[in-house]
Image (spheres, rainbow, N blue to C red):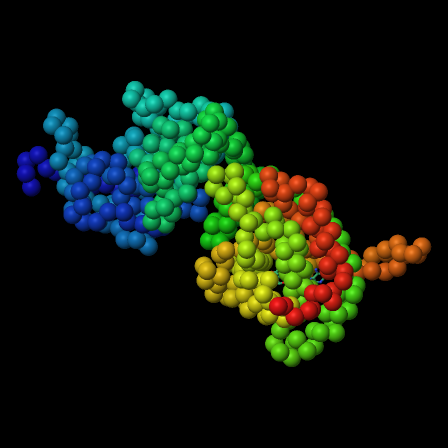
Amino acid sequence: MSAAESLVQVRVPDLGNFKDVAVIDVLVKVGERIEPEAPLITLETEKATMDVPSTAAGVIETLHVDKGGTVSSGDLVATVRAAPPAGAAADQGASAAPPAARAELPRPSAPAPAPAAAAAPESASAAASPSAPAPRTDLPPIDEPGFSRAHAGPSVRKFARELGVDLTRVKGSGVKDRITHDDVKAFVKGLFAAAPDAPAGTAALPAVPPVDFAAFGPIETRPLSRIQRISGPRLHASWVTIPHVTQFEESDITDLEALRLKLKEAATAQGIKLTPLAFIVRACVKALQAFPTFNASLDASGANLVLKKYIHVGFAADTPHGLMVPVVREADRKDIYEIARQLGELSEAARNGKLSGAQMQGGSFTVSSLGGIGGTAFTPIINAPEVAILGVSRSAYKPVYRDGVFVPRLMLPLSLSYDHRVIDGAAAARFTTFLARTLADPHSLIEAVP
Ligand code: CAO
């Protein structure tokens, strides 16, 4: 060891009431050169993840913890062979983290900050830094408890603070979804790209104020499933970027149901489950052929409509892992039996987690049927970049006025959500009227497909 070098012991800082906290990541290796504040390990309590930063620059001499192990306040994390800057005294075995590092750690037992304090900088050093740009005041307020829990290292937190970025809104691309500098940069770029001509504040949506639910009673926090984490942002994007309108209609499927029950047994004998959905998909194909703008997408410029010459119908499938949308390809070339067979095979694959990416791509229109479960109507979210989605609810017998008397008829509720940039209300009403009429006269639906 040279005269300028010294061994620094980095220890777990004060974790408040927490003991035996899980080490979910070891972020450095023996022999690795590190900067001061570099995150060494990531800890996870049931409330938060946090990094333990190094208190010195230098080379990792020894690591005293393993991934999967546990630590408590004051435990030794690493020994760093440090080369302190001229004049600075090395921390010879000090157990506590320096003030800046402490300020980065969430205070596990502290209550969530009051909204008024939410805009306060996370660390005194960040607040005092004369070179730090002023935080953006036109972005939504930062969700402070969420920011503390975000899976990001101290330098990324500092960077986000400087830009006024709320880390709860940034998706991490690092190990275990850890948020990196590049993720923060991409988030900021995304904000501006979303509305290049708009004032900065209008590019971001106002955040819902954070609530400390535990203040009102016991709670349990569960992570969203992987599929929810993937589909959530896509549903959100569709909801906020597409002007949705939903058109409701009812179809008299009394005759269709009688026909289905007649055909069901023979279909079952061939291993096919003939539910109303196969007829509905077939009827949608006919409606899409009659109204091609419903089988289309806006191009990237938003100035042109791309009309598709193929009809691939996606359908929402409820699975233990979350909502999935497999696609019946070339649905226009399939009769109800083949459609029913594919619906069965694809939904089974979805439930068993065996759908391939290709089986979920290329849809040009989607049907979301809750008919097997219940409900009278709903407003489905368009599966962008498609321009329309049909929601189907549970059929029920209703009194229908015909030839001067009320008669019981089996009525199927239909809910068509459409992109109003592409489809006018009159076109939507024509589409649903056509669909309802087609379902009401089922014989055309069982004809062989050319
Ligand atoms: N009205 C009355 N009964 C209906 C019906 C309707 N609209 N649709 C289906 N049924 C009946 C079926 O005939 C079947 O009864 P039988 O066995 O007696 O014939 C029963 O309900 C169950 O049908 P199913 O759900 O097994 O089959 P399906 O073809 O109707 O649906 C699938 C397949 C994959 C779409 C469905 O299982 C599913 O996952 N639905 C949920 C979709 C969803 O979550 N949508 C919401 C997305 S937006 O959040």
Extreme-front residue of the structure = 450
Name the residue at 66% across, 58% down.
286
Q: Quadrant of the C terminus?
A: bottom right
Name the residue at 70% across, 77% down.
265
Extreme-top residue of the structure = 130
Name the residue at 74% across, 65% down.
442
Residue 384: horizontal and vertical position, in percent? 54, 47
- The answer to which quarter of the image holds residue 278 is bottom right
Residue 419: horizontal and vertical position, in percent? 60, 43
Of 298 and 151, nearer the camera is 298
Of 156 and 449, nearer the camera is 449
Q: Quadrant of the N terminus?
A: top left
Q: How many marks?
A: 0
Q: Is residue 358 visible?
A: yes
Extreme-bottom residue of the structure = 269
- The answer to which quarter of the image holds residue 134 is top left
Is residue 170 toward the left or the right of residue 280 in the image? left
Image quarter for ligand 1 equals: bottom right
Is residue 250 toward the left or the right of residue 131 in the image? right
Instruction: Please tell me whether residue 49 is drawn above or below residue 86 in the rendered image.
Output: below
- The answer to which quarter of the image holds residue 52 is top left
Extreme-right residue of the structure = 404
Residue 157: horizontal and vertical position, in percent? 35, 34
Residue 145: horizontal and vertical position, in percent? 46, 36
